[in-house]
Image (cartoon, rainbow, N blue to C red):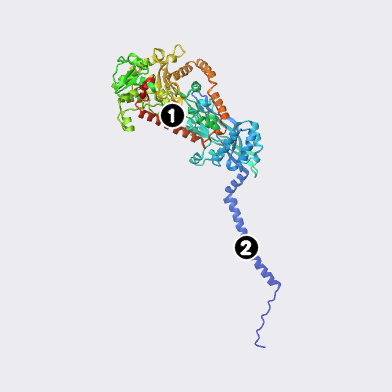
Amino acid sequence: MGWRKRAKPREVVTQSTLDNAFDRRTFVIGTAMGGVGVLLAARMGYIAIAENEKYKLESESNRVNLSLIPPRRGWLLDRNGAPLASNRADFRVDIVPERTPDPDATVATLTRILKLDENQAADIRKRIADGPGYQPVEVASGITYDAFAAVSVRLPDLPGVVPQRGFSRFYPTGPSVGHLIGYVGTANAEEYAEQDRNPLLVTPGYKIGKDGLEKQFEQELRGIPGARRVEVTAAGRIVRELETREDTQGDPIQLTIDGPLQDYAARRIGLESGSVVVIDCLTGDILCMASMPSFDPNSFSQGIGRVEYSMLSQDERVPLRNKVLKGLYPPGSTVKPMVAMSFLREGLKPEDSVTCNGGLRVGNRVFHCWQRRGHGRVDMAKGIYQSCDVYFYHFAQQIGMDPIAAMARRVGLGQEFDLPVLSQFYGTVPDPAWKLKKYGREWQAYDTVNATIGQGYMLFNPLQLAVYAARIASGRHLEPKLIKSKTRQPFAPADFSAEHVHLVREAMKDVVNGPGTAGRARLPIDDVLLAGKTGTAQVVGLNLSNGKTGPWKYRDHGLFISFAPYDNPRYACAVVIEHGGGSGSAYPIARDVMTFLFDPAKGMEMLRGFEEQWGGTAQQRLDAKYRAFATAAGESVKPVPARDEDIFDQVEAEARLAVRQQESIADKKVDPRLDTAASSGQVSE
């Protein structure tokens, strides 16, 4: 069988071959394991050396919690250093909605612990639902330590709840400074985005300026936040506090406002709706800018509830509108001293006169004087202190409107002032060019007649009236100031004659201290004489109201400008009372405000007597009104807007609409009372 294939010899396995095979496998595996070890060592080295800082920070963040401490806001001070807006230590509780799995249950628990009422609980739920989840929602502030502790011990069962000790904004005089100072509130989504998602803005307890001077000086008042480092467990429970860096309080802002005078004027307005402005004739400092009725900025800063908002928004006297800067009114006869100065500048002699028989025919219409039986022979002085309309009707047609409009601008009417305010309405000084541009129609004689007694198209705010009074009183081109400065810049002489100023001031003295229209405005101080000018501005025609009675919104506005002492003026004042029924509602307030300036004790004595009749101070009456409204409201209360800003935007829009309506009334009627054969002059004393 030689052809059969020879079998391959079987390999002999010896100890040597086994050792060689084992060594080769060991080498391959060892090399692989060594390579892996080198890679691991390299990675560990990279992590330990190159990325040391990164993982150290991550490790530290798991162990340590870093939180911002909201800075205390700078104080807003009056001219004497007393606080108009300050901070007070308090305990507060906030909710961060995105950290709260069941907001309704959490709010229910907090309502029980903090003893909140159902209206407050409903407001909290609405703010949680309407706001962005990251934004803290205030539950309560100013709570007691016991309530604060009761919430703190329940934190494991209240995720997203943040109790903290801190500082809240406090306004000592409440509604007296509401429109002037404004208020603070939690930043909204737009503000958060505008400031590059600054984490401070979503820190529980932190609030920014929302209106008034609080918003205008936000950056100066804000301060620098502090920080707190605490060691925590994996569940977030605090083990110990490691380090704290204190916050730096914001800078204080000192205003020219006289705090006690501001509070007095606001309270003296009483049950009326209106404003008071007082200016220092030497420095231009605004001592008072009171607008009433107002709101309590403490309520807005804590997060206004739907009941209180409804109370304010439904009030026909519009307590959310700053009447000093955004209230525009026909000035009535308060413009007559200015008109007289324009007559003098154009060459009219003070002794030039006209006979007033109670009216004057202009074209085919008769414009009546407020004194229907007439004033007899009237020269310039008598025209001012008796407020004779016929005198001004007669000579205004000879002089023309352009010189009157130019003088109005010289004394500050219709002007916008350089003040740190968010906005101001500056009204209208009408003239032929203005009417042609706005309405495409020529100026007529009846336009001049209406304007010369402060009716028709003329609209001014109370601040402008106060500046006007101060410029006539001082004879200088005074500019109002709201921020107190250490240096005083002298004002240039005004662009009108000192002799003309003297003549007008003498006549204004007799308005109060002579045979004028405001004898009851005389000061109860023997050596101080008040000079002034009354004004009554009509609102509707006689077919709706006689201006003194009937529905509140149909009554005439009352105005009064003044300065004292008349022979060496130091203070100028303007008072405007909405629908007060005439100037008789305005000049008693000016009298008492001026009395307080020269004799505070006597002024306060008079005020206390009034407040006993009115039912308490402005703050007390506001609190009582809220309690009554809340009791009667029930479920009929309107929902509060999602943001406080929406409230004030709505009020601003309504104010602008009101101005357009006033201009429309003036445009449609030569004189709103001509339909009844009367004249706007009838109520211009």
Q: Which residue is mark 2?
A: 32
Instruction: Please indicate whether residue 153 sits to the left or right of residue 474 in the image.
Output: right
Above or below residue 539? Residue 152 is: below
Where residue 33 sits: x, y (%)?
Answer: 63, 61
Between 255 and 151, the one lying in front of the other is 151
Residue 508 position within the rendered picture, expressed as x and y whole percent measured from the top left: 38, 16
Q: Quadrant of residue 392?
A: top left
397 vs 526, left or right, is left
363, 639: nearer the viewer:
363
Identify the mark at residue 286; answer none if there is no mark: none
Between marks 2 and 1 in the image, the one whose residue lies nearer the viewer: 1
Residues under numbered marks 2 and 1 in contact, where contact means CB atoms less than 8 Å apart: no
Mark 1, residues whose alpha carbon is within 10 Å: few (<14), some, or many (≥20)? many
SS for callout 2: helix
| The residue positioned farthest toward the top in the image shown | 526
Instruction: Quickly name the residue at label 1.
Output: 326
Q: Is residue 251 left or right of residue 149?
A: left
Of 406 and 201, nearer the camera is 406
What amino acid is found at the position of numbered circle 1 in the picture?
Lys
Residue 467 image position (x, y, % from top left): 40, 23
**Image quarter in which the C terminus is found:** top left
Gap between marks 2 and 1, in whole Å? 84 Å
Q: Residue furthest bottom?
A: 1
Label 1 SS: helix
Quick one: quadrant of the N terminus? bottom right
How many marks overall?
A: 2
Q: Is residue 203 visible?
A: no
Q: Which amino acid does the dot numbered 2 rest on?
A: Ala
Residue 159: x %, y % from top left: 62, 41
Q: Is residue 268 visible?
A: yes
Badge 2 density bin: few <14, some 14–19, many ≥20, Cα 10 Å: few
Specify which label sits upstream in the sequence, 2 or 1: 2
